[in-house]
Image: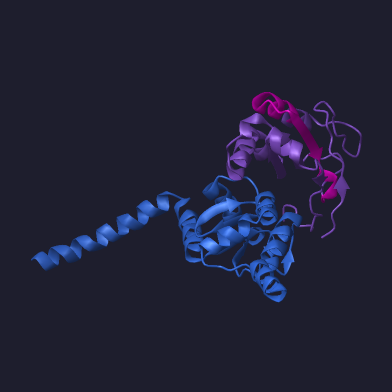
Amino acid sequence: MNIILRPGVFNCLNIHRNMSGMVGIIEYTIRNKLLSLLEAKHLDVINESHMHNVPKGAETHFKVVVVSDKFEGLPLIKRHRLVNDILKDELQSGVHALSIIAKTPQQWDCSDKVVESSPTCKGGFGK
Amino acid sequence: MNNLLRRSIFPIYANSLKLSCRSFADVPIKEKIDNIVKNNKVVVFMKGVPDAPRCGFSNAVVQIMRMHAVTYDSHDVLSDEDLRQGIKDYSNWPTIPQVFINGEFVGGCDIMLQMHQSGELIEELKKVGIKSALLTAEESKKEEVK
């Protein structure tokens, strides 16, 4: 499997730009919701839509890296459900893929803070 | 008389049963999924088929299963629109792929990947009587060292 390494970003306010250099409205909403509802200590919202068979500037495929105290004591599946739930509206209205990395601050500090890129598309989008 | 009564009532009863089932349009797909996940130890709902996955995330799950040499039942959601929506409702999980072990929803691609990396997947498989090929390989290595 080809794995492209991407350096971790340590600043919550850092905003990943998509291919056209603009931050989309959905990316902005996802960021705000996760920051406020999970009080994220670290947050990465990465628009990976350009890796897929969708129009330029689309907001369909995202990866989020969330570091929050609220994950303490929760198994992975519950952490993911929490994030899915917060982003329910987005997932129902056009966000098609959401990859989640959910860690507690302690886990994040112990990790190498490197976020692997999602697997490449196999062209099955929507059909 | 009793016999006669039974015969005349039974068809009515049977008919109304059929009707009541049909009035809940989501019951059949839920039952279908119930059967699928309860009759197989490991089930993967994915896009495409194991030999030709049509989504990178589904492909990642297939690769993980292959590494552990797990036989599993796979279902292509792209060839069945009812299943595609049905499985999301069934597990209350918004994305595909979805993995079930022993009838229970375990997670999607991210969770499988992390369970694979942490060794948790080997343990989960063990619980349902499946020995991961990675465990077998590890054991034979230890044997060689001895």
B59 left or right of A117? Answer: left
Query: On the rendered image, what quadrant is the C terminus of chain B found in?
Result: bottom right
Which residue is at the front of the view, B134 or B95? B134
Residue B63 position in % (x across, y down): 72, 63
Q: Residue at x 76, y 42 (%)?
A: A111
Residue A12 position in % (x across, y down): 80, 27
Q: Residue furthest top?
A: A36
Provide the residue span drawn in magenta.
A31-53
Q: In terms of image quadrants, where is residue B44?
A: bottom right
Query: On the rendered image, what quadrant is the N terminus of chain B found in?
Result: bottom left
Residue A80 position in % (x across, y down): 63, 41
Q: Is residue A96 visible?
A: no
Which residue is at the front of the view, B138 or A7? B138
Residue A10 position in % (x across, y down): 83, 32
Q: Residue furthest left?
A: B1
Q: Residue at x 82, y 43 (%)?
A: A114
Instruction: Note whether B17 is above or below B2 in the view shown.
Output: above
Q: Residue furthest front?
A: B146
B6 left or right of B78? Answer: left
Instruction: Note whether B118 is above or below B40 in the view shown.
Output: above
Q: Is residue A22 visible?
A: yes
Residue B40 inside the magenta-drawn segment: no
> Color used for chain B?
blue
B94 left or right of A48? Answer: left
Coloration mode: by chain
The mark tally for this picture is 0
Residue A51 inside the magenta-drawn segment: yes
* Chain identity for the colour purple used in the image: A
Which residue is at the front of the view, B48 or B99? B99
Which residue is at the front of the view, A11 or A20? A11
